[in-house]
Image: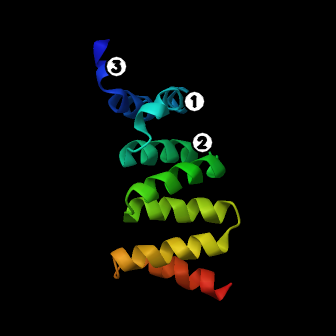
Amino acid sequence: MAGLFLYPKRHLRKLIRDGEYAEAVKYGESIKGNFERDHDFMFIMGSIYYMVEDPKSALAYFERAASLGEDVETLKLKANAHLELGDKDGAETCCIKILKIDPKNSEAQSLLEKLEAL
């Protein structure tokens, strides 16, 4: 049991792996104060909210994760959350940032082309 307190992100991942999303949200929210500057934690929480179809909450976590260090995976999920919220410009901005990091990223290129055609 002590391991849960020593490795809270591990416990959070286990809850996700076990499909306990509501419990993962509850647990993550209870410990988030300890991880305000932890990109990995912010990404995990954004992912949980994305899985439970709460794009607004997911986006808040993905924005925080991106502010701590932009990476392709965070930006992809952030773009999708923007799309689900009807924010085409936000999704385009994410795609452009992805292509700056990874110019050959076909997913971002394809999505950007579709968005520009709208």
Q: Are marks 1 and 2 in contact (CB under 8 Å)?
A: yes
Q: Quadrant of residue 89?
A: bottom right
- Residue name at image x 54 percent, y 75 percent: 93
Give the secondary structure at mark 3.
Answer: helix
* Residue 2 vs residue 118, the one in the foreground: 2
Q: Dot 2: few (<14), some (14–19), or many (≥20) neighbours within 10 Å? A: few
Decide which of tag 1 and tag 2 comes sooner along the chain: 1
Decide which of tag 1 and tag 3 comes sooner along the chain: 3
Give the secondary structure at mark 1.
Answer: helix
- Residue 5's disc is 3
- The residue that label 2 is drawn on is 52
Q: Is residue 60 above or below residue 77?
A: above
Q: Is residue 107 visible?
A: no
Give residue 47's position: percent from left, percent from top.
Answer: 49, 47
Cα distance, mark 1 to mark 3?
Answer: 19 Å
- Residue name at image x 50 percent, y 59 percent: 77
Give the secondary structure at mark 2.
Answer: loop
Give residue 4's position: percent from left, percent from top.
Answer: 34, 20
Q: Are marks 1 and 3 in contact (CB under 8 Å)?
A: no
Give residue 18's position: percent from left, percent from top.
Answer: 43, 29
